[in-house]
Amino acid sequence: MAATEMNPDALGHSDMDYPAHYRTYRLFTSLVKWGTVTAILVILLLAFFTL
């Protein structure tokens, strides 16, 4: 098994691509937020037009 060297000043694993991880996390949270807002609006519109 190959040993990986890690910078003692760095936080986390040296092979992680943290900027890409943070972009992916922000995209995920944004999609969840806007997906929730869209679902709520669809439910409200359906309730409004069917009552």
Image: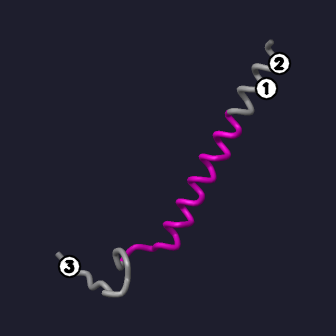
Binning the other alpha carbons within 10 Å of mark 2 as few (below 14), some (14 to 19) or many (20 upward) gives few
Q: Position of residue 39 (x, y in %)?
A: 67, 34
**Quarter holding residue 49:** top right
Placement of 48 over or under 29, stated as above or below: above
Residue 49 lies left or right of residue 24; in this view the side is right
Give the residue drawn at x 36%, y 87%. Answer: 9
Other-residue count near label 1 (Cα within 10 Å), few / some / many at <14 / 14–19 / ≥20: few
Query: Distance of mark 1 from mark 2, alpha carbons?
Result: 6 Å
Q: From the image, which quarter does the C terminus lie in?
A: top right
Mark 1–mark 2 contact, CB under 8 Å? yes
Do callouts 1 and 3 mark residues in contact (Cβ within 8 Å)? Answer: no
Report which residue position mark 1 lands on. 45
Asked whether, in this view, residue 31 is left or right of residue 42, the answer is left
Residue 40: x and y, percent? Answer: 69, 33
The residues tagged by marks 1 and 3 sit, at their Cα atoms, a distance apart of 57 Å
Which residue, given by chain and number where applicable, does mark 2 sit on? 49
- In the image, taking residue 45 as reference, residue 32 lies left or right, namely left
Q: Amino acid at mark 1?
A: Leu
| Residue at the left extreme of this rendering | 1
**Residue range corresponding to the magenta coloring:** 15-39
What secondary structure is marked by label 1?
Answer: helix
What residue did someone put label 3 on? 2
Residue at 47% from the left image edge and 73% from the top image edge: 18
Q: Which is nearer the N-term, disc 1 or disc 3? A: 3
